[in-house]
Amino acid sequence: MTTHTHSVDSRTGRPLRWLRHSLILARRSLAKTSRNPGAIVNGVVTPALFLVLFLYVFGGAVAGSTDNYVQYLFPGIIVMGAGLAGLVSTGTNINIDLKNGVTDRFRSLPISRLAPLLGSVLADIVRYLIAVAILFLLGTILGFRSHGGVTTTLAAIGLAVLFGFCVSWITVLIGVMVKSAEAVLAFSFLTFLPLQLGTSLAAPTTSLPGWLQSWVHVNPVTAVMDTCRALLNGTPPGDRLTTTLIWCAAIFLLFCPMAVWTYGRRE
Amino acid sequence: MFTVSQLLTERSAVTDLGLEAHELTKRFRGNTALNGVDLAIPRGQVLGLLGPNGAGKTTLIRVLATLLRPDSGTARVAGYDVARQPGQVRRRIALSGQHTSVDEELDGRANLVMIGQLLDLTRRDATHRAEELLSRFGLTEAGNRRVATYSGGMRRRLDLAASLVGRPQVVFLDEPSVGLDPGKREELWQMIRDLSSDGVTVLLTTQYLEEADTLADAVTVIDHGRVIASGTPAQLKQQVGGHTVNVRVNDPADVDRVAAILTVVTDRTPARATRHQLTVPVSGDDDFFQIAAELRRQAVNVSELSLRLPSLDEAFHALTDASAATPTPQRP
């Protein structure tokens, strides 16, 4: 009996247990990705398709030439990839865990309820960074050149990552709320389409009809895309950066606690 | 007997209960899943929780394992209150069974190492503990294979191993042997007995009464979210039916003669179980010996003569039928 009681308390007093547990669970998610790289393929292929499609369909019409247009389009595609990273994996993975009982084991362990969710989102960021590297390679082949210098280019990517991290909590919340993984995808796409495409992604907003213009202007994704576009083209982002940061904070502060709360109480 | 950490916790040093629940209730949208459940398991014992589907077994386990908050009532597990000290409870429990699972896409070893690390073992200790458990559950060879390739029996063993990584004091097993063939079930039972002899308190839900009969120190039967009976398996059997005498003859022609003997001794009409077999309830051992003596005196050739308690199956059906006869408005 005595052998059973000193059990697992040895390191519980250490700080940042929740972060360590999140990293352990992020590694779990990444180990699965390395066995089954579908999530990365999805994260690359969809933005790459939009990139190539828009570039050759609209390029001439919007910007006069594909060379000019790729400078406009590519930063938006990077931001779209960030939003997509969480969409294709976190929400569905968390939902699958809930259904097959892995979550019950996690929830009966003495770990923070945040850890499984944060772990999954952190793994998304790693997958997204891999996707960004591939997209940059593709962009470069298609003629994109960053005019912002190394630091500014990294800042633009960092901003897209930050945004991806924050919007992931929306899919996490959907993942812990709805019944099936299919429904997660359906719901997520419903939020994805207006958020990602109702933006300045493909064309400057001035050519849009009035009602769409008002939506595009309030859409946080437009702010992120504008900021990244400015940074990567070597122009000052101005107040778009502030708007982006405020939106990121607002989305995170709203959806992260809601997701963790719902996860802890899901019956 | 007690370690320092136990003495420091006010309750566990003074109580010898591994688990106790008082008046637990839990409702889901007007559907009462638990309706005032009381339960107690002495430390190191196995309690079998029986009940028909939908009786509230899984809900009860989920409340005790801190996955659900009870609407009212209290429960202490390993000395800690499940509602007020869920973190302390989670350090001391493990959950395994039909609704719990390991990660199918990782290999067996990685699953155990991950849980060890989540329990704050160092990577080295977690790896060491994983090896120990893989070998104890006969999974060393399979340790590097994805769990998705495991057979049902292997998966169940890994699931149990995963539960034991943190050396829990209380283990919840929700229908642990569902889907196992009889040989594998026997193997699992041995593992559960080993747990109990190591001092672990086990709460086990099952639909197989034989399982409760062989494993459980005590049995609690619940139906419609309420405890309808509890006691040792022997007590439950007695509570329901008392003893019966069972006589089997070689020659069916003797059946009438035996029936007459049974009627005279017991004052009851025996039941014909088969062409060769009669059973009759008796009030005590005396009747049994009188029947034996009378059979010998009349030189009846019998192939079997036994005094037995009703099976747990019979007890269970008698109990749940009785409970079903009492209407419970909470359930549709």
Image (spheres, rainbow, N blue to C red):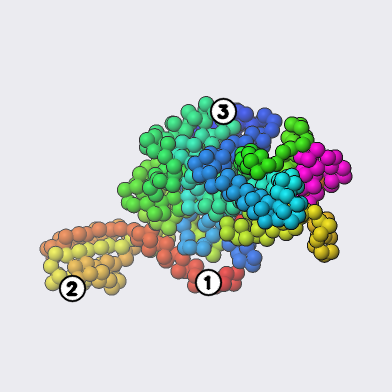
Identify the residue at horizontal 45%, vertical 53% (top origin): B175
For disc 3, the chain is: B
Q: Are marks 1 and 2 in contact (CB under 8 Å)?
A: no
Q: Nearer the viewer, mark 3 or mark 1?
A: 3
Q: Residue B125 in magenta?
A: no
Label 3 amino acid?
A: Thr
Residue A77: horizontal and vertical position, in percent? 69, 48
> Closer to the camera, A234 or A90?
A234
Identify the residue at horizontal 45%, vertical 69% (top origin): B321
Residue A72: horizontal and vertical position, in percent? 75, 47
Instruction: Tell me the residue that label 2 is attached to.
Output: B256
Residue A48: horizontal and vertical position, in percent? 63, 48
For disc 2, the chain is: B
Q: Nearer the viewer, mark 3 or mark 2?
A: 3
- Mark before the other along the chain sequence, 3 or 1: 3
Q: CA distance from mark 3 to mark 1?
A: 55 Å
Instruction: Tell me the residue that label 3 is attached to.
Output: B122
Q: Nearer the viewer, mark 1 or mark 2?
A: 1
Q: CA distance from mark 3 to mark 2?
A: 74 Å
Q: Is residue B211 left or right of residue A240?
A: left
Find residue A151 and report its image quarter. top right
* Range shown magenta: A221-243
Dominant secondary structure of the magenta stretch? helix
SS type, badge 2:
helix
Label 2 amino acid?
A: Asp
Quadrant showing the C terminus of chain A: bottom right
> Closer to the camera, A82 or B99?
A82
Instruction: Tell me the residue that label 1 is attached to.
Output: B326
Q: Is residue B57 left or right of residue A114?
A: left
